[in-house]
Amino acid sequence: MYLVGRKGVKSDGECVGHARGQVGKVFAVYEYADAAGARHRMTAVDGSSVRTGDRHDVVYNPRKPNTAFLWPVSMKSVRNHVLGGAALTLMLCLTSYSISGGTL
């Protein structure tokens, strides 16, 4: 994984709207410009309390400007990523168990 915090480039991001996830969760969509002035968009983990027009620091990978994160990274976003991954793994295991007729 690229160390965005250490080698990333900071840009000023602006919330340009919201996207809805599969379970109705709301994600903020931020737009930012790279050093060359090209515009990019990224979807933040949590956007329910963010209004369109709100600004936030974005850090992007200068080698792949489409790879970006809100800065600073909050414990809430880390927790959401971890819980989301665990929930997905559990769901896949239960689906596999169900399909196999309850045998492993």
Image: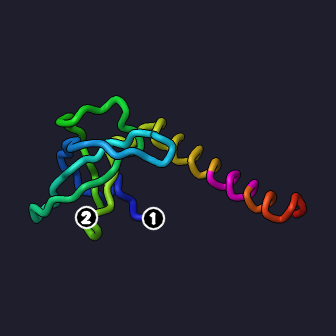
What's the residue type where badge 2 is placed?
Pro
What's the residue type where badge 1 is placed?
Met
Among the 4 quarters of the image, the one containing residue 70: top left
Q: Residue at x 9, y 61 (%)?
A: 37
**Secondary element at tag 2:** strand
The answer to whether 12 appears left or right of 78 in the picture is left
- Could you tell me residue 90's position as x and y percent? 70, 51
The residue that disc 2 covers is 65
**Quadrant of the snapshot with the C terminus:** bottom right
Q: Residue at x 62, y 53 (%)?
A: 88
Which of 82/16 is in front?
A: 16
Q: Residue at x 30, y 32 (%)?
A: 50
- Could you tell me residue 60's position as x and y percent? 28, 57
State which tag comes first along the sequence, 2 or 1: 1
What is the distance, in whole Å, between disc 2 and disc 1 at their CAs? Answer: 14 Å
Among the 4 quarters of the image, the one containing residue 39: bottom left
Name of the residue lying farthest toward the left: 37
Q: Answer yes or no: do the residues labelled 2 and 1 have beta carbons within 8 Å? A: no
**Secondary element at tag 1:** loop
The residue that disc 1 covers is 1
Q: Residue at x 69, y 58 (%)?
A: 92
Nearest to viewer (mark 2 / mark 1): 2
Residues in magenta, as a range: 88-94
Compared to residue 18, the image places residue 31 above or below, namely: below
